[in-house]
Image (cartoon, grey):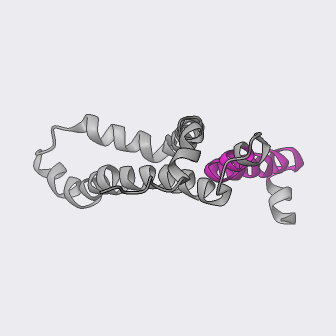
Amino acid sequence: MDRMVEVLGWKLTALMIGVSVLYFIVALAPVWWPAIRVFRSRPRLPRPVLFVAVVACLVYGVFFLLGFVVLLPLEAYRVFLLPELDPAGGTRGHWLTASLDWVSDYGWIVVVIAELALTIQLTRTLAPRWAHLCSPPPPQTS
């Protein structure tokens, strides 16, 4: 830490630590945002821990699926196929590599902002229906 302060100075070090803490807090929004909604609302939602877990799993699951289905094959293309095709002149999709470079450089910012927006939207959509979702089904009459 002392060496980092020597190289960067106090102001830049404090700024980097502040941005890191802020990023960490916003990245955990799928956990704390529904928790605030559950514990501050009256009447309180039933099964509050389950509500927080469901919202967090839905948000993180959407971004895992996006990364696994879209970004992983594109990164595999960029790492394994593009270096082989480029010398042969077989690449016509330079827009694709430029887009992947942009995602690699700035995607971490976009993901956290989109994660926060999806968390807020899911919490607002799911909270009014939560009591109905947690209630037992009506008895079957034959």
On screen, residue 129 above or below 74: above
Viewer-side residue, 40 vs 10: 40
The quadrant in which residue 89 appears is top left
The x and y percentages for residue 15 are: 80, 44
Q: Residue at x 44, y 50 (%)?
A: 63
Q: Residue at x 56, y 54 (%)?
A: 56
Quadrant of the snapshot with the N terminus: bottom right
| Residue at image point 42% right, 50% down | 62
Write the residue at 59% across / 35% down. 124
Per the image, is 25 magenta?
A: yes
- Tell me: 93 left or right of 47: left
**How many marks overall?**
0
> At which x and y percent is residue 33?
68, 45
Of residues 9 and 101, the one nearer the viewer is 101
**Closer-to-camera residue (29/104):** 29
| Residue numbers of the magenta segment | 8-36
In the rendered image, residue 29, in percent from the top left (x then y), is placed at: 65, 47
Query: Can residue 29 be found in the magenta stretch?
Result: yes
